Image (cartoon, rainbow, N blue to C red):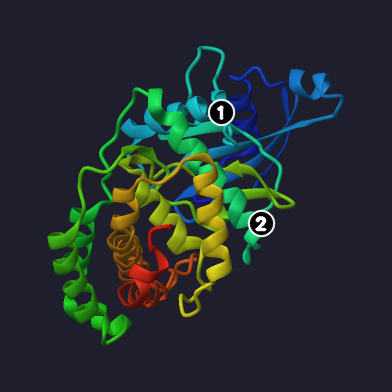
Amino acid sequence: MAVYTHLGADQLAALIAHYDVGTLVSAKGIAEGVSNSNWLIETTGPEAQRDGGKTTRYILTMYERRIDIADLPFFLGLMDHLAAKGCAVPRTIHDREGASHRHVEGKAAALIEFLPGISVDRPTPAQAHSVGRALARNHLAVADFTMTRVNDMALAAWSRALEGCGEEALAAIDPALPGIAFEELRYLERQWPGGLPRGVVHADLFPDNVLFAGEDVSGLIDFYFAADDAFAYDYAVTHAAWCFSGDGRNYHAAIADALMRGYEEVRALSPGERAALPVLARGAAMRFIASRAEDWISTPADALVTPKDPMDFVHRLQFYRDHGSEVFRPAN
């Protein structure tokens, strides 16, 4: 279970008391997630009474690792901005003093609006279409978002991560991995495009970060890799996350076509963005090869969380190298 810090009932009740959400009724640890502790919170408060229900649900997140607490105002402010713009993004519940997060046991914690819906393992084309539209809406909505954050998981970070792993450790994952990874890094360093439309992007929009009500997106969550980058790169990350089988060996063209149609119904990609997508998609694959390899090597053998296989994204990378130009061919 992804609850790394234990909070007793009294501690949770005391924390919730700082918010105008009523009295704590229940708190249940959430198993999903690998970086933070999460609880599903139920309270009896004004919103429950207004909606005619007995309780109102929230998500309580305690930030454990991989997140610089100095970045929390950016992440939470972004969510509030997108929610205010009508995007399917949960808002932050601010405490009575107006703060977006508090500290418990020396760690930061935030109370987040609960959005109903389920995440899917095998999306339909209709769901991919909805995701494309939701992603494009976010890209338009950040035009007047004034906060900024450098992407600390960009190209230079992939190189540092893989060099830090070392060739021997990478080869222990798969003998072919070091050669593929370092060759690809050299290619990307030469070919990485610049001058593309940019703004604050999600940068991690995997299926488990999207909630659905049927075929419609009901929520986009987990903005903790959000940063300034090219919108087309964010699209490429989403393409790599949604358009393949889990192991990356099978490409789902119908999902990819629906994703693109949905995106361009809301925001048309420029010719320059279209031309850059084959390289950006290779970069998207490399980003997750690097972070997964680092996690694979650094995760203790007795850890409760099983690290994800970087080779799943090596397979995507190989597909993009072989077929990227045809997959992202400019529309006639």
Picture quarter with the N terminus? bottom right
* Element class at badge 2: helix
Residue 149 place in picture, x, y as percent: 29, 34
Residue 73 place in picture, x, y as percent: 39, 27
User: Residue shown at 17%/60% (left/top)?
Assistant: 191
Q: Nearer the viewer, mark 1 or mark 2?
A: 2
User: Residue shown at 34%/60% (left/top)?
Assistant: 284
From this view, report whether residue 271 is shown above or below residue 74. below
From this view, report whether residue 163 is shown above or below residue 38. below
Residue most toward the bottom?
A: 175
Asked whether residue 98 is in view, the answer is yes
Residue located beneath label 1 in the image:
83
* Element class at badge 1: helix
Locate residue 167: give its quadrant: bottom left
Between 233 and 202, the one nearer to me in the picture: 233
From this view, report whether residue 295 is shown above or below residue 87. below
Residue 283 place in picture, x, y as percent: 29, 61
Residue located beneath label 2 in the image:
126
Residue most toward the top?
A: 97
The answer to which of marks 1 and 2 sits earlier in the sequence is 1
